[in-house]
Image (tube, rainbow, N blue to C red):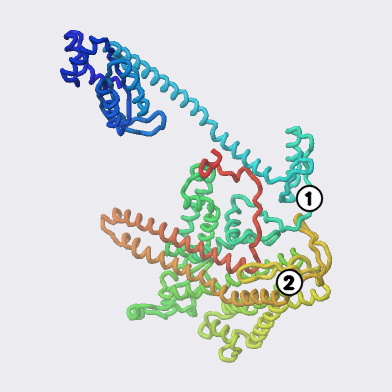
């Protein structure tokens, strides 16, 4: 305000008083100055009022002054360039600096009232130039002092905050722990005296001594008058499922629980998945070179697993790879093994033991001559000729097959039969694991009415197919290769009962096939009607067989429903968490139609699933073939181009070619093909293996633990 009003008033001590007064008010006309001189002679006192007013009010303010004061005021104003904050309302507005000159105290009182009505911010205005300079200097000194105080305050606050930042993480953890503890305490209930808290929790039996010891230590350290204690109480609810894992088994357990959390005390497929999952992956991904790269990458992650930079990243894709580092390591190691079996390394074969086929023997036995070589583009090695074939290769596929024109035909037959054998063994193992569920839940009748029909149906049909594959490999030699019958034709004739149409594999094959077919067909009605009829008979007064207790679980196509069946009024024994819920069998409601419907759905699902699931394992052959062909195409289209350049620039040209080959190998064959094989192996475990014995309808046991609290400031609502 002082800076702007200085432009309104100019004093000059060297000039005449009237001229000085005129120069003080350059906005006055000379006639007005004469009136001002007359007012001074009459004893009227000249006064000044200065302040700030909003720009939108200045015109109305000026008119009001003119009408009320009858021209005895002079208003000068100028707009401020910057926007100022209203100290009362906090709004940012444009303001105007004004200076009002008036004559007489009465006019001054009116001006002040008008300023109050327009909410002007008034400031004292010095009458002389010296006073204005003193005020300006005083204001500058105050401003400088305030800047100094603010600067020192900011420095002090920075020091305080820097000191506090060293402990803020610890404070956050402590607040989170306190909040979590109070949240758990709020879930507890008071006893009758309102002096103790009662908490009903699930606790593993092995951890009960630790729990008691922790409660005793807490009571002693806190000086509680009432000690804490633990009582095991009977419960009618099914306990949650706890599976203890470590950093190696947790990844495989997550694969299983992605399908569903197991029921309490149900067989856990995770220990078997540790072997079967990477093996089935490697069957589809089998390549020695790609397996080594994958294993080395996973080994690096395993060795650097304690590195915080690798753990605490926001890249979700990297976190997925890092959490599954042990799975990737196992998949890489198994791929190295299957790559040796396939004798496939970047689409090339390794000649480790030398070939067991001899081209020289064909010339020595005079089967080939030079004329034969010149007149034939393709020649076939005859294993019946002495010395041409010396026996099976020690490990995997003979490297000479990499040069054969019928290599793909040979490998297709080999891998397709291998896929069927692995699939039947895998599914049979899943059916056998169901026995342990029946024994543990004391449903021994299910072994006779469910397990045996399922196993007989699977083995009499598809187990016999595996038997024919292995028998044909062992029974027919090279000399009998032209007479070896087709296994597919025999398997079709088994269902058509036309055993005499083709040459049998072994004596009595037709009768044996009819016997197996009859057994498999008879197992279907046993599986369909066995358990419903037994439960109906048991409900209407029959004696129980083998202490049939517990809940009878009947599978639907998409979920499991519980059909409560009791034979006698007896309590359930067993481990911690089991409960007694005995009812008299005559008092229970039994719906035979509902039980029969559920069992028929399970029977249809299983019988049709055996056929479709067996065909589903052919993906092992299909993806293995696709991976091998992609490797061969990539080598032929990229790497072979660089190797054919034999000029002096060949080495220089080979460098970018190898770089392109490496990038395509990692991006296509390792990442894309690896992800494809991973997903197919996941499907084989979820659909073809686990549905034979694993329900996955339980609830996971998640104990109270500080380690489960978020360690970052993100998604925090307590700060």
Q: Which mark is residue 336?
A: none
Q: Residues within 10 Å of mark 1 (few under 14, many from 20)?
A: few
In the drawing, does residue 697 fall left or right of residue 114?
right
Q: Quadrant of residue 85?
A: top left
Residue nearest the viewer, comparing 487 with 542: 542
In the drawing, does residue 256 fall left or right of residue 35?
right
Q: Is residue 23 above or below residue 98?
A: above
In the drawing, does residue 73 fall left or right of residue 535?
left
Going 35% across and 22% down the picture, which residue do you hit?
112
Q: Is residue 560 visible?
A: yes
Q: Which residue position is annotated with label 1? A: 232
Which quadrant of the rendered structure holds the N terminus?
top left
Q: Is residue 274 visible?
A: no
Which quadrant of the rendered structure holds the C terminus?
top right
Q: Residues within 10 Å of mark 2 (few under 14, many from 20)?
A: some
Residue nearest the viewer, comparing 614 with 261: 261
Residue nearest the viewer, comparing 332 with 105: 105
Q: Is residue 115 above or below residue 489?
A: above
Residue nearest the viewer, comparing 215 with 379: 215
- Alpha-carbon span between mark 1 and mark 2: 33 Å
Residue 627 is situated, as x and y percent measured from the top left of the image, at: 45, 66
Count of picture labels? 2
Going 52% across and 80% down the picture, which residue do you hit?
478
Going 70% across and 68% down the picture, which residue do you hit?
553
In the drawing, does residue 119 fall left or right of residue 489?
left
At mark 1, the secondary structure is: loop
At mark 2, the secondary structure is: helix
Callouts 1 and 2 close, C-beta under 8 Å = no
Q: Which residue position is annotated with label 2? A: 447
Q: Earlier in the sequence, mark 1 or mark 2?
A: 1
Residue 105 is situated, as x and y percent measured from the top left of the image, at: 32, 15
Residue 141 is situated, as x and y percent measured from the top left of the image, at: 35, 15
């Amino acid at each position: 305000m002082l800076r702007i009003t200085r432009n309104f008033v100019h004093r000059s001590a060297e000039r005449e008083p009237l001229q000085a007064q005129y120069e003080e008010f350059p906005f006055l006309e000379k006639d007005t100055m004469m009136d001002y001189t007359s007012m001074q002679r009459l004893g009227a006192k000249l006064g000044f009022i200065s302040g700030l007013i909003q720009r939108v009010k200045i015109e109305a303010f000026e008119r009001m002054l003119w009408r009320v004061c009858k021209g005895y005021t002079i208003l000068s104003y100028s707009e401020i360039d910057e926007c100022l904050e209203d100290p009362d309302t906090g709004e940012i507005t444009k303001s105007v600096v004004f200076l009002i000159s008036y004559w007489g105290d009465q006019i001054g009182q009116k001006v002040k009232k008008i300023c109050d009505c327009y909410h002007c911010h008034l400031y004292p205005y010095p009458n002389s130039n010296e006073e204005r300079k003193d005020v300006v200097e005083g204001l500058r000194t105050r401003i400088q002092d305030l800047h100094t105080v603010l600067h020192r305050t900011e420095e002090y606050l920075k020091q305080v905050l820097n000191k506090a930042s060293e402990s803020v993480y610890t404070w956050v953890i402590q607040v989170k722990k306190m909040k979590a503890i109070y949240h758990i305490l709020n879930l507890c209930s008071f006893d009758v005296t309102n002096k103790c808290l009662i908490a009903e929790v699930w606790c593993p039996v092995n951890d009960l001594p630790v729990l008691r010891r922790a409660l005793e230590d807490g009571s002693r350290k806190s000086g509680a008058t009432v000690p804490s204690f633990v009582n095991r109480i009977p419960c009618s609810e099914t306990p949650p499922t706890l599976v203890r894992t470590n950093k190696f088994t947790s990844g495989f357990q997550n694969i299983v629980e992605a399908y569903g959390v197991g029921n309490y005390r149900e067989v856990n497929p995770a220990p078997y998945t540790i072997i079967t999952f990477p093996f089935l992956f490697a069957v589809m991904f089998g390549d020695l070179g790609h397996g080594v790269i994958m294993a080395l990458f996973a080994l690096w992650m395993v060795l650097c697993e304690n590195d915080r930079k690798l753990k605490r990243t926001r890249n979700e894709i990297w976190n997925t790879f890092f959490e599954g580092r042990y799975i990737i390591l196992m998949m890489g190691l198994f791929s190295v093994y299957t790559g040796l079996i396939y004798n496939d390394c970047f689409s090339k074969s390794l000649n480790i033991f030398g070939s067991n086929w001899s081209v020289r023997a064909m010339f020595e036995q005079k089967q080939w001559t030079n004329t034969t070589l010149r007149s034939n583009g393709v020649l076939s090695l005859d294993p019946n000729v002495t010395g041409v074939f010396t026996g099976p290769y020690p490990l995997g596929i003979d490297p000479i097959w990499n040069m054969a024109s019928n290599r793909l035909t040979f490998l297709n037959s080999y891998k397709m039969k291998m896929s069927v054998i692995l699939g039947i063994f895998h599914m049979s193992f899943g059916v056998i694991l169901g026995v342990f569920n029946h024994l543990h839940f004391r449903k021994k009748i299910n072994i006779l009415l469910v397990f045996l029909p399922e196993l007989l149906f699977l083995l009499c049909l598809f187990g016999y197919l595996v038997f024919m594959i292995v028998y044909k490999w062992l029974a027919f030699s090279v000399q009998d290769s032209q007479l070896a019958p087709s296994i597919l034709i025999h398997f079709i004739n088994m269902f058509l009962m036309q055993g005499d149409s083709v040459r049998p594999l072994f004596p009595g094959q037709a009768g044996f096939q009819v016997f197996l077919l009859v057994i498999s067909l008879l197992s279907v009605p046993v599986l369909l009607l066995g358990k419903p009829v037994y439960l109906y008979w048991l409900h209407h007064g029959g004696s129980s067989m083998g202490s049939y207790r517990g809940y009878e679980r009947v599978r639907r196509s998409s979920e499991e429903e519980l059909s409560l069946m009791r034979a006698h009024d007896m309590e359930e024994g067993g481990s911690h968490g089991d409960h007694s819920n005995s009812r008299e069998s005559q008092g229970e409601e039994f719906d035979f139609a509902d039980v029969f419907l559920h069992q028929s759905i399970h029977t249809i699902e299983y019988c049709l699933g055996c056929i479709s699931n067996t065909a589903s394992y052919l993906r092992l052959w299909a993806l293995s073939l696709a991976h091998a062909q992609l490797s061969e195409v990539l080598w032929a289209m990229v790497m072979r181009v660089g190797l054919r350049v034999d000029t002096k620039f060949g080495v220089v040209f080979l460098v970018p070619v190898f770089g392109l080959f490496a990038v395509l190998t990692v991006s296509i064959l390792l990442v894309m093909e690896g992800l494809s094989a991973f997903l197919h192996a996941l499907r084989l475990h979820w659909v073809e293996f686990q549905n034979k014995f694993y329900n996955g309808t339980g609830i996971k046991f998640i104990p109270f633990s500080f380690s489960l609290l978020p360690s970052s400031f993100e998604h925090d609502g307590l700060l």
